[in-house]
Amino acid sequence: MLHGLLASLLCASLAAPAGAVFMRTEMDKLDTEHLFDSEYFLDLLSFRQPLEWSWAWDAAPLGYRINGASLDRSDLWLDQEVKLPKRLNDWLAFDYRLENRGDKDLVEFHQWLAFDFGPWRGFGFGLVGEPTFDKQDADIGLRLRQAAGPATLRAGVLFPDFNFNERGTTGEAYARKPVTYTAGADLQTGTGRLSAALELDMPLIREVPASGRIYGYRRTRAALSWQRPSQGTTRGWRAAYAYEFKKEEDRFSPATLANLAAHRKVHIVEGAAEGAFNERDRWEAGALSMFRGGLTDTFLPGQKDARHKRWELQPYARWRRATRPWAVTETALFMSVGEDYRIFPGVGPDKRDSLVEAKLGLGVDFLPSKSGRIGFYGTFDLDDADRHIWDGGNVRAMFFF
């Protein structure tokens, strides 16, 4: 009985039901590790919004934000989101969420609709889904919520492409249909918040008869964070851990060079603090530590299998200064040290690269009103300044309704 109770609490205590779920675009690229050059992950950190922006977004009930950054001559890193919740009466609420994220690993676009019922003594439930023109790609699910004092527990289940086999427009079908289980918890700790999240994309099998392809997929994501936003001269901080496991497999009949299996494990630990020097100047400093491990299996004798081991430590610091009531400048330094190790068992030679990167970030935020801000930023390559000093720019904006 105790084990059953603990299992129930775990399922109910670990993030939101609508999030990263299986999409058809997952099948386009199985092995993406070779796309991440020595600067890639530091680029993502240097383009990320400061804590001041993140905390303002978390505190706003309604809003839109976008962050677009140049990764290279052909790719744009894009992160945009809309949140529009609306309580209709004492027992019914509507919620619309747009999530669009794109990088060299995956491009995602979701429009989630939800109706939430309750709460009754802290308990509520909701229906969530993503309608699409092609009915085969529509998602539907259920989510639960229980509030008790400073704690809120959430759990949900989502069925991606839930009627694909019955209403498909191609000859493709799921031999094992996709299901995503989610759970989460938030705990208010004074002026701070402790959050935990879990997403389980259960194993699926998708058949593509036209090419003799059988595709398999599964993924697990987990996250834990503890943060306290800064308030005026009071220092704020954030600590977080994230984990991802992902496995994909392609098998063709008859066997071809495209037969491939790829899996990876990613661990990320980060910490940061933010505060004020004085009325005009604010600082932010932190570090991110990442470890990525993975395997690419070609299945065919004589073909190169590969193991990937990559770690990076990325310290950074920002100085933000209010030069006008409507303008804030930023000067930032981003650094990375680590190693990218690729092993080719039985074939060789192995390849081991040291990673040492440094970037300078300069930018300015314009604040036309309390309900909006727009930022223009550029990064400069300090470790390779003799060849190309310019290292890409980004534009970010955030508006509250």
Image (cartoon, rainbow, N blue to C red):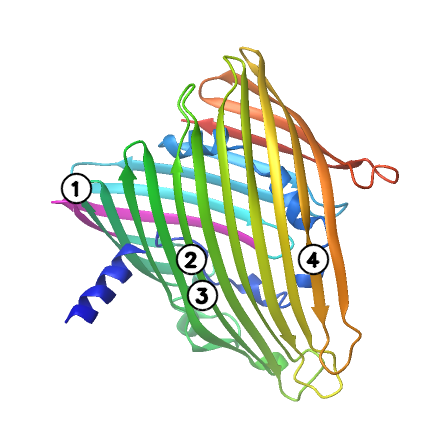
Q: Which percent across, then down, holds residue 170?
A: 53, 73
The Cα–Cα distance between marks 3 and 1, rounded to whole angstroms, is: 32 Å
Q: Which region of the structure is painted magenta?
A: 107-126
Q: Which percent across, then down, holds residue 136?
A: 45, 65
Q: Which residue is mark 2?
A: 222
Locate residue 374: give its quadrant.
top right
Mark 3 touches mark 4? (CB < 8 Å): no
Q: Find numbered disc 4 in the image and state the secondary structure of the residue it sits on.
A: strand
Categorize mark 2 by other alpha carbons within 10 Å: few (<14), some (14-19), many (20+): many
The Cα–Cα distance between marks 2 and 3, rounded to whole angstroms, is: 28 Å
Identify residue type, mark 4: Glu
Q: Is residue 6 above or below residue 318?
A: below
Q: Which mark lies nearer to you, 2 or 1? A: 2
The Cα–Cα distance between marks 1 and 4, rounded to whole angstroms, is: 54 Å
Q: Is residue 254 above or below residue 53?
A: below
Categorize mark 3 by other alpha carbons within 10 Å: few (<14), some (14-19), many (20+): many
Q: Which residue is mark 4?
A: 339
Residue for point 35% across, 51% down? 196
Work out whether residue 32 can be spotted: no
Could you tell which of marks 3 and 4 lies nearer the N-terminus? 3
The Cα–Cα distance between marks 2 and 4, rounded to whole angstroms, is: 25 Å
Locate residue 233: give its quadrant.
top left
Q: Which residue is mark 3?
A: 136
Q: Quadrant of the N terminus?
A: bottom left
Q: Which mark lies nearer to you, 3 or 4? A: 4
Q: Nearer the viewer, residue 65 or 335?
A: 335
Examine the residues drawn in magenta and state their main secondary structure: strand
Could you tell which of marks 2 and 3 lies nearer the N-terminus? 3
Categorize mark 4 by other alpha carbons within 10 Å: few (<14), some (14-19), many (20+): some
